[in-house]
Amino acid sequence: MFVLCSKLKVCSAWREVLYQPKFWRSLQPVLNFRDLKTSSPSLRLGIYKSLDRRAFDSLCLFGASDEDIYDLITQCPQSMANRIRQIGLRCSGITDKGLEVLLGGLPSIVQLELSGCNEVTDAGLWASLNPRVVSLTLADCINVADETVAAITQLLPSLYELNLQAYHVTDSALCFFSPRQTTSLCVLRLRSCWELTNHGLLNLVHSLPNLVQLSLSGCSKISDDGVELLAENLRQLRHLDLSWCPRVSDTALESIASELSQLEELTLDRCVHITDVGIGFLASMNNLCTLYLRWCTQIRDYGVKTLCNMRSLQILSLAGCSLVTANGLSSLIQLRHLQELELTNCKGATRELIQYLRQNLPHCLIIE
């Protein structure tokens, strides 16, 4: 991602070379409309043409208003409008009408992100969402609630990935998921949905049994019973994020270890009730290659030494695990396949210990 600047100039020969699309693939330009508020129409048109020449298929709009959206849709080359497949709106004041104009003018959109768009409502989503969308992100949009999920499940039959961060979504929202999404939806991230409870997960696991990635980060009412429900029914999970779930304990880890044999990545940051006992359960998971235990403050040396049985482990974070000493950390040299080890804010990660680990794990990036 990069921010366009109208003041960058190079000689014409270099410009022709650098405009070749091959140099811009996989990059997402950011149009900062707060900086463009006072710009002339000719300057904006020049920027749109520049984007078109470089054949971008992705675009981020920062601080856009309805007027900015109208300008973009009416002035950008049609070839650019037809090419854009991914659009992000961040910290924007657009209304439902602006969203409808935007998505109506960009017919090829398959990935949509709305972050900090507080004027967009459920009605706007009902009017605007295109069934071609396969990836949707809604974050920090104050009007997002249960009815939003209803619109998503009804209007997006091919949705593969849904990222939802909304404080007002309740268990009722999860009732809108149905067998209609069973085959398509594989990635679901429900972040900081504070009102979700174990009861809401009941419908989720029966409607979406083929989920591959699930995040409940910050869903603070989810407890061990909810995790047990997930583990028993979502057997295809490869990635699970339970960070900032303070009611999750060792009991949940026992369920995960016994039921989710295909799990490859597990995030447990700030699960403060997890102890060495729970870590012992995880040690039996042969496919787990990424484990985040940041600020799990009850973990001690015994738990760390238990991790040494996980020969497939490649990425491990013990950041903020203040009870782990140099003795426990030194045992990690047994993890010969380890590629990344995070030890920030670990009291036991002395200078001598870090040096010892680097000598014995030469292919591992150690973050201190």
Image: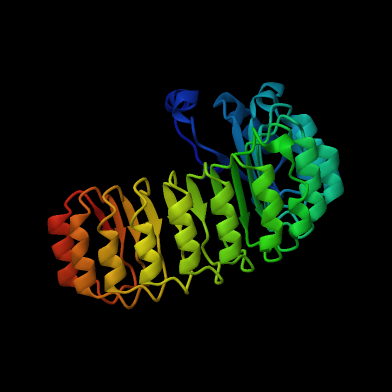
Quarter containing the C terminus: bottom left
Give x and y (percent) for residue 236. Answer: 52, 41
Give x and y (percent) for residue 188. Answer: 61, 47
Q: Which image quadrant is residue 134 in?
A: top right
Give x and y (percent) for residue 339. Answer: 27, 49
Q: What residue sits 75% from the left and 31% below the top?
A: 131
Q: Nearer the viewer, residue 45 or 156?
A: 156
Is residue 225 visible in this depiction of the protein? yes
Q: In the drawing, does residue 233 fall left or right of residue 10? A: right
Give x and y (percent) for residue 353. Answer: 17, 69
Q: Nearer the viewer, residue 58 or 40?
A: 58
Q: Is residue 300 above or below residue 161?
A: below
Q: Is residue 101 above or below residue 352?
A: above
Q: Which image quadrant is residue 359 in?
A: bottom left
The image's colour scheme reads rainbow
Q: In the drawing, does residue 220 fall left or right of residue 278? A: right
Q: Is residue 32 above or below residue 78?
A: below
Q: What residue sits 38% from the left and 61% below the top?
A: 281
Q: What residue sits 29% from the left and 58% below the top?
A: 341
Is residue 368 visible in this depiction of the protein? no
Q: Which image quadrant is residue 76 in?
A: top right
Q: In the drawing, does residue 235 fall left or right of residue 334? A: right
Q: Nearer the viewer, residue 57 or 331?
A: 331
Number of marks present in the image shown: 0
